Image (cartoon, grey):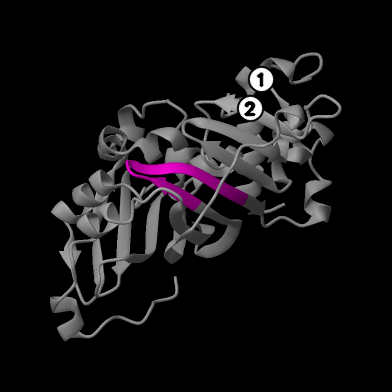
């Protein structure tokens, strides 16, 4: 099994860039403020879709770790709900190399988040659900299940986060670029705090830098963000983690509902078996 995936499996047990076409110089000169434009998108029942690739680069080799796709539903105050499906780029033969209790880590996983409550289907938690239940209710849970801490850490659906990024950004033709630390993201971004499940970065992790590029239309709508940060910041070794997120359908109708109550189990209902506890999960 590839080194990045082995690292993910170890986490579960231990704590268990292609360029896009730029706009013309004249279009760039007319680019609206992305944070102000985003604020105008916050209409109840509307939102945006995205697709995402999470890549690991180590020793000069880049591997796709995870593919994600989902939607954000807005309210007047920002993101009200989301649905995100994560698929690990792992062959079935590689999964079989892992201990049986860890194989669920690499199963497809869907997370519906309503407010701050996550509902998780599949993945590692799906292995421990009681009979007749397909979803786990996770209060104050991660927005994308197990893959949250490895994915896009820069919440560009948040005006405050955009303002922080743009305040020190370099601007080109339809693209902004810059750096931001984990500590800065923790301070300004609810999205970042949710990916870390309330675990405030300290020490070297707090100083870890995220290098980012933000692509926008002439009207100021975000079409893409590419961010990179050290793998050591999320326990993946000495390489770099890069997340390439692309947005489509701004302003379209989006309706996200929680799963049916009869299909949902609580955290206390998980059947972890002998010798296992939530403290062994990285998101527990």
Q: Based on the picture, tell me whether residue 80 belongs to the magenta stretch.
A: yes
Task: Identify the residue shown where x is 81% and y is 17%.
Answer: 273
Q: Position of residue 278 (x, y in %)?
A: 64, 19
Q: Based on the picture, tell me whether residue 220 belongs to the magenta stretch.
A: no
Looking at the image, residue 96 sits to the left or right of residue 209; the answer is right
Q: Distance of mark 2 from mark 1, alpha carbons? A: 7 Å
Does residue 228 lie above or below 102 as drawn? below
Task: Identify the residue shown where x is 62% and y is 50%.
Answer: 86
Q: Position of residue 262 (x, y in %)?
A: 76, 28
| Between marks 2 and 1 in the image, the one whose residue lies nearer the viewer | 2
Q: Residues within 10 Å of mark 2 (few under 14, many from 20)?
A: many
Q: Give the numbered dot on residue 137.
A: 2
Q: Position of residue 151 (x, y in %)?
A: 49, 49
Task: Identify the residue shown where x is 46% and y is 49%.
Answer: 73
State which tag comes first along the sequence, 2 or 1: 2
Looking at the image, residue 163 sits to the left or right of residue 203; the answer is left
Q: Position of residue 18 (x, y in %)?
A: 44, 75
Which residue was labeled with disc 1?
267
User: Closer to the camera, 73 or 202?
Assistant: 73
User: Which stretch did the figure color magenta?
Assistant: 72-85
Does residue 61 lie above or below 262 as drawn? below
Q: Are marks 2 and 1 in contact (CB under 8 Å)?
A: yes
Looking at the image, residue 230 sits to the left or right of residue 132; the answer is left
Q: Is residue 120 visible?
A: yes
- Write down the quadrant of residue 160 in the picture: top left
């Amino acid at each position: 099994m590839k080194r990045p995936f082995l690292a993910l499996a170890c986490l579960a047990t231990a704590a268990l860039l292609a360029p896009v076409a730029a706009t013309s110089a004249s279009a760039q000169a007319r680019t609206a403020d992305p944070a102000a434009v985003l604020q105008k998108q916050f209409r109840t029942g509307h939102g945006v879709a995205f697709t995402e690739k999470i890549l690991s680069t180590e020793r000069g080799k880049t591997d796709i770790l995870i593919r994600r796709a989902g939607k954000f539903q807005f309210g007047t105050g920002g993101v009200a709900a989301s649905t995100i499906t994560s698929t690990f780029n792992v062959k079935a033969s590689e999964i079989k190399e892992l201990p049986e209790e860890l194989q669920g880590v690499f199963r497809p996983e869907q997370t519906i988040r309503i407010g701050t409550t996550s509902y998780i289907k599949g993945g590692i938690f799906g292995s421990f659900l009681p009979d007749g239940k397909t979803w786990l209710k996770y209060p104050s849970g991660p927005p994308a299940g197990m893959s949250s801490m490895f994915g896009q850490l820069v919440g560009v659906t948040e005006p405050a986060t955009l303002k922080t990024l743009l305040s020190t950004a370099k601007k080109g033709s339809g693209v902004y670029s810059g750096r931001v630390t984990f500590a800065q993201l923790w301070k300004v971004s609810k999205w970042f705090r949710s990916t870390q499940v309330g675990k405030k970065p300290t020490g070297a992790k707090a100083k870890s830098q995220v290098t980012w590029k933000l692509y926008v239309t002439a009207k100021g709508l975000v079409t893409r963000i590419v961010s990179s940060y050290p793998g050591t910041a999320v326990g993946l070794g000495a390489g770099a983690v890069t997340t390439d997120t692309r947005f489509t359908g701004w302003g379209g109708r989006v309706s996200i509902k929680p799963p049916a109550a009869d299909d949902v189990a609580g955290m206390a209902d998980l059947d972890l078996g002998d010798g296992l506890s939530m403290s062994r999960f990285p998101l527990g």
